[in-house]
Amino acid sequence: MQVTLLKPREALSYQPLPLYSSSVPAGFPSPADDYIEDSLDLNEYLIKHPSSTFFARASGLSMVNAGIMDNALLVVDRSIDPQHEDIVIAAVDGELTCKILDKQASVLRAANISFAPIPISEETDCIIQGVVTHVINKLCTRS
């Protein structure tokens, strides 16, 4: 899965949107659940460390089994220390990729078994750019 970096905005804008107090069932909605609990600002929800966060656009199918679809928007935090099994953005030999960090096997692993793992060793030029904290997949193609 290749990754394209997106430029962050100079300043985050505050844009609160309604947050409903009840969870949304995947079945039939209840007419009694019309209560707005609060407002939600996506910048505040998605970005915990603004100065260390960037966005990236995923391309490819290697991470679909982790919920990262082709053309997904990734929220990446550079301030988080990458741990075993984290989904990370890594620069491998100068090319960005989105993979699962497997510290035990010393590889970057795809979530799709059709893709081979990328070995990490002293000889590999691999720099972890950040940990993926959120993924945004577009569901409606008309918008």
Image (cartoon, rainbow, N blue to C red):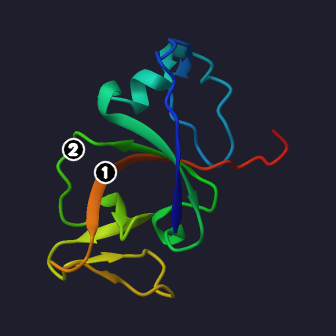
Question: Please, which residue is most extreme toward the right here?
Answer: 142
119 sits to left or right of 110: left
Which amino acid type corresponds to the residue marked 2 in the rendered image?
A: Ile
| Callout count | 2
Q: Nearer the viewer, residue 71 or 10?
A: 10
The location of residue 4, given as percent across then percent down, is 54, 53
The reply to whether discs 2 and 1 touch (Cβ–Cβ < 8 Å) is: yes
Q: Which residue is mark 1?
A: 131
* The image quarter in which residue 15 lies: top right
* The image quarter in which residue 45 lies: top left
The location of residue 116, given as percent across then percent down, is 42, 87
Q: Nearer the viewer, residue 110 or 31?
A: 110
Q: Which residue is mark 2?
A: 80
Label whose residue precedes the other's in the sequence (2 or 1): 2
The residue sitting at 64% across, 56% down in the picture is 71
The location of residue 46, given as percent across then percent down, is 42, 32
Which amino acid type corresponds to the residue marked 1 in the rendered image?
A: Val
The residue sitting at 19% across, 79% down in the picture is 106
Residues at marks 2 and 1, CA–CA distance in whole angstroms: 6 Å
Residue 44 numbered mark, or none: none
Q: Looking at the figure, which quarter contains the C terminus?
A: top right
Above or below 43: residue 88: below
Above or below 136: residue 2: below
The residue sitting at 48% across, 85% down in the picture is 115
94 sits to left or right of 57: left
Binning the other alpha carbons within 10 Å of mark 2 as few (below 14), some (14 to 19) or many (20 upward) gives some
